[in-house]
Amino acid sequence: MGLVKNLTRQQLQFFDTHGYLVIEGFSDPEEVQSMRKRMDELLQNFDCSNVSIFSTKKQTNLTDDYFYESAEKISFFFEEKAFDDDGKLKQSKELSINKVGHDLHGLDPVFSKFSHSEKVTGLLLSLGYKRPVIIQSMYIFKQPGIGGEVVPHQDNSFLYTEPSSCTGLWLALEDATTSNGCLWALPGSHKNGLVRRFIRDDNGVHFDKPSPSYDYSEFVPLEVKAGSFVIIHGDLIHQSFENRSSKSRHAYSLHAVETDGCIWVQDNWLRRKVDPEPLYIS
């Protein structure tokens, strides 16, 4: 018996209209806890003497070989505000990490099990994918008090195919609220197409165009419970604000692209030596 498409007509209509879809209860508490426990283990074994900082505001300046090589590794990136004036961590590494990426789905058995599960693949088939691959994965911490802002962006800017095919898949591992930095989306913005691209060339990484200005009153918050899954169209404008609360907002994020009739563009920041295997071949 083949894989089953698992989105309803009503869900697909909502996604087509708004550019995002929230599926409550996608993962049960046991599955959520298994990923959180595994990340605790990875953090305990991480040697934080090698420091790399992640920022959506300054990544063109902060990008280094550690970032580039993370495409096929499990790498750890710190929050900008995690360090004092002397360059030392203000608190434990567990409360200072911004994210871990970008190949958890390929290298770690716990995250791979979820990323390549039938329910994730069935969802992608529902969206029309024929030979989807998970191209990138991230565990995002959104640390209490210092969790950094993620500025308005489109996933197709960073993970571009011709024609464009990226879809973001975001699993809440803790409740996400307006207080601790939940996602915010600009409904319907995916219908306006791709605004700009994040390019890697001989000069490093940079955007090919400046960011437009946005009316923040038009964004809607996506407050969700742990275990909820958010599907994000590759052209949807979305963001999250700083976490100034005392509660973290852990999430596991995946990005899928199509390999059937789509070409991975060589000036993407993410470059792999070995192409990932498709989740499903129709």
Image: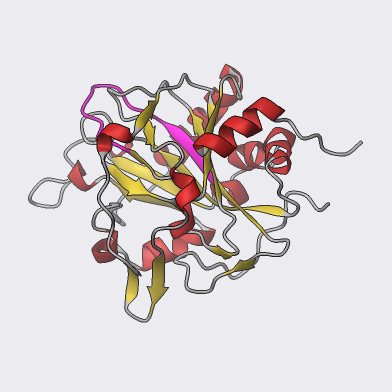
Which quadrant of the view contains residue 211? bottom left
Q: Which residues are magenta?
A: 240-254
Q: Residue at x 42, y 51 (%)?
A: 154
| Corner quadrant of residue 247 | top left
Question: Which color scheme did the rendering employ for the protein?
Answer: secondary structure
Q: Residue at x 66, y 64 (%)?
A: 262
Q: Nearer the viewer, residue 123 or 63?
A: 123
| 277 to 91, vertically: above or below | below
- Residue 193's x, y, as percent? 47, 55
Which residue is rendered at x = 48% and y = 21% of the image? Answer: 226
Q: Please state the horizontal and vertical placement of residue 98, each as a whole percent of the image.
A: 33, 43
For residue 93, above or below residue 49: above
Q: Position of residue 204 (x, y in %)?
A: 34, 74
Rendered location of residue 235, percent (x, y): 48, 50
Count all numbered tags in the image, as a single digit.
0
- Rendered-image quadrant of the N terminus: top right
Let me know if residue 244 is in the magenta part. yes
Q: Is residue 109 visible?
A: yes
Q: Main secondary structure of the magenta part?
A: loop
